[in-house]
Image (cartoon, rainbow, N blue to C red):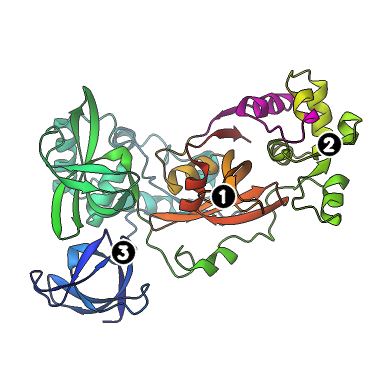
Amino acid sequence: MNTTGRTRAEVELRAASSLKSNFVDRLPTDCEVEILENTNRTFKVKPTAIKSGVSGYLPSIAVIQKPESIELFPKIQDPKSNRKFNTVPESLKLSEFLEWANNKKSVLPWLSAHDRASINPTKIEEIIQQIISNTLGKKAEWGDWIQAIKANERFGEATMKEWIVMLAGGREMFSIRDHIVYTYPDRADEHQGWILSGQIARWNGVIKKGKKNGELRNFCEVDFYRINKEMHGFIREELLEDYVYPDPNTDVEIDSNREHVFDLKARRIRLPEDDEIIEAKNKGYTASQYIDVFKATQKHLIHFSLCGEICVAMITNNDIIPLLKNWLDSGFWRAPAILKDPHEGTSVADLQSILEIYDLNGEVYSSIPTSAAKIKAKLDEGKIAIVGAGINSAGVVLPKGRIRHWVVLTDIIPSGNNGWVRVYNPFHNQEEVYRYDDFIASSGVGAGLWIQM
């Protein structure tokens, strides 16, 4: 067959197509395999990411294959930015869509004025007809879906994503933390087993309400396979995220991808350019951030913990020395004490005090529980994040870095149940690329700030 797939969870590899045959190996979650043969209910596979791995058989439900691209609704490309957008966003409420479909008072009112202007006027009727054809035109399915939503008292909250997933035959979703797979959404005493963080279930598009711990919650109906057990049940909606099938250029298991997933030469941010930073480099200091603060304080002192201040300087399009002067002039009570002590770092409150000088406010950044896609959605809203991470003495962000350090998160590319992050690291006054899972592990509970730019 010469096609590939990926495991949705850790799974037992068998010697023959009978799942009762001898156990030969256990493959990890999201392990790429070459599919050698399709035996109806099983695949004969060989792991490609494991050296000297043996071939064997897996149940077909345990293997994810790259989905075919199905576009129910037209996508439009903005001629100026080349950005593509959906004419029917998945986040669109069903109630809003029906109001438009029943009245047609305006053309796709849920789109921004800019996006509506990007649509070729001669194509509008064709687009509308395709939208109607794939919704109201499918009378039986569309009517059954709306009736089921009303019966479950979800009419006011249901989105078009549910319809899109149902019509596409399902979607792969990964769990952003460990969770029980319930037999029914309102029966806590019955469950199929556990889905662990990063493992992948297939959602059929159905969402049902259930009461847990006295609160109504939404649960997605899924099919799942782990170890040697097939499960059909329900997982909390907010704990599932779209699984983006990795391609060879974005797969996080191919470490060389970090060199090209982002074009770091295409500068998106201005780096601080103080003479002091250049001098630190010329003197061979370990870090570019180890600068003399004399021009700000009138006292010579090499400060080793200015990462937070330099991050704010980058965000506010400033050099660091002018920013430190403004901070001292602001009267913030901790500023003089911090700049007198070469090892005194900054807290979230300290960073807020600098941002306020430039009429910026931050909201608390949190990484638990979250996903690359959820963080990317905030970045796409025009926000940027100062994040506390752990580094080693060379300034490298590491999951178990023992030195606390501020960096700026500027971009994310989701891939599989993981992804790549682009960050500004003041240690070397440069942008760097890390695996998303390593970055999140480094940031711990996610101390930091989201700033609207």
In the rendered structure, the answer to whether residue 338 lies left or right of residue 127 reads right
Q: Of circles 1 and 2, which is in front? A: 2
Disc 2 marks which amino acid? Ile
Q: Which mark is residue 321?
A: 2
Q: Earlier in the sequence, mark 1 or mark 3?
A: 3
Q: Earlier in the sequence, mark 3 or mark 2?
A: 3
Gap in angstroms between the C-alphas marked 1 and 3: 25 Å
Q: Of circles 3 and 2, which is in front? A: 2
Work out whether residue 120 can be spotted.
Answer: no
Disc 1 marks which amino acid? Asp
Q: Residue 416 location, x and y as percent? A: 39, 58
Gap in angstroms between the C-alphas marked 1 and 2: 27 Å
In the rendered structure, the answer to whether residue 199 lies left or right of residue 453 reads left
Observer-nearest of 171 and 334 = 334
Q: Is residue 361 magenta?
A: yes
The crowd level at tag 3 (other Cα within 10 Å; few <14, some 14-19, many 20+) is few
Magenta-colored span: 339-365
- Residue 239: quadrant of the picture: top left
Tell me the residue that label 1 is attached to: 411
Tell me the residue that label 3 is attached to: 67
Gap in angstroms between the C-alphas marked 3 and 2: 52 Å
Q: Residue at x 84, y 36 (%)?
A: 321
Observer-nearest of 84 and 97 = 84
Find out whether the residues at labels 1 and 3 contact each other: C-beta distance under 8 Å. Answer: no
The answer to whether residue 2 is above or below residue 434 is: below
The answer to whether residue 87 is above or below residue 321 is: below
Disc 3 marks which amino acid? Pro
- Residue 202: quadrant of the picture: bottom left
